[in-house]
């Protein structure tokens, strides 16, 4: 199996982050204009959140979440590619991880049902942990 197979889910995650960034801009900017919130209030995003509706903030919250756990996913997948340890198991795990993160994004940005988000978060962590543990055993 070629290393590019583990990079495909990495790029899908990157594209998801890009789409959420556009979504955030498409919701935040009009809300700020409608509510007459000066852009300088965005200097401290915690303070900006106080001025914007929840449906706008939840997209921004998801954008921030895409720079937390997924960063480790990127590192693991890139390490697997560099080490040429890509196999069907890792590729399948990577795609499951991406699917779970997409579901997490949709849930948080559209509905923000915390218990559903939590289950998706835990499931994605378990997939990522499986990848980390399996490769750690191979390395050590």
Image (cartoon, helix red, strand yellow):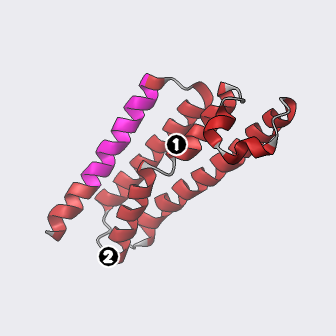
Query: 53 or 11, which lies in front?
Result: 53
Q: Residues within 10 Å of mark 1 (few under 14, many from 20)?
A: some
**The stretch drawn in magenta includes residue 9:** no
For the magenta stretch, what is the residue range? Answer: 115-131
Can residue 1 be seen?
Answer: no
Is residue 70 positioned above or below 125 on the image? below
Q: Secondary structure at mark 1?
A: helix
* Residue 118 lies in the magenta-colored region: yes
Q: Residue beneath label 2, please?
A: 84
- Residue ID for mark 1: 102
Residue 24 in picture, x, y percent from top left? 69, 43
Tell me which residue sits at (54%, 56%) in the image: 12
Which is nearer the eye, 120 or 47?
Answer: 47
The dot on residue 118 is none
Tell me which residue sits at (40%, 72%) in the image.
3
Q: Along the horizontal axis of the image, is 26 left or right of 96?
A: right
| Residue located 39% across and 73% down the image | 2
Residue 90 x/y as whole percent: 32, 59
**Which quarter of the image is occupied by the N terminus?**
bottom left
Q: Which residue appears at 34% of the width and 38% of the height?
A: 123
């Amino acid at each position: 199996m070629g290393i590019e197979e583990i990079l495909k889910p990495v790029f899908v995650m990157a594209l998801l982050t890009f789409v959420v960034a556009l979504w955030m801009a498409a919701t935040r900017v009009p809300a700020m204009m409608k509510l007459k919130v000066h852009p300088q209030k965005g200097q401290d995003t915690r303070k900006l959140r106080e001025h914007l509706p929840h449906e706008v903030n939840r997209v921004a919250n998801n954008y921030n979440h895409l720079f937390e756990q997924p960063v480790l996913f990127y590192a693991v997948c890139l390490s697997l590619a560099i080490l040429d340890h890509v196999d069907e198991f890792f590729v399948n795990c990577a795609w499951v991880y991406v699917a779970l993160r997409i579901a997490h994004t949709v849930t948080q940005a559209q509905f923000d049902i915390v218990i559903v988000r939590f289950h998706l978060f835990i499931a994605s962590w378990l997939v990522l942990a499986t990848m980390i543990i399996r490769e750690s055993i191979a390395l050590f």
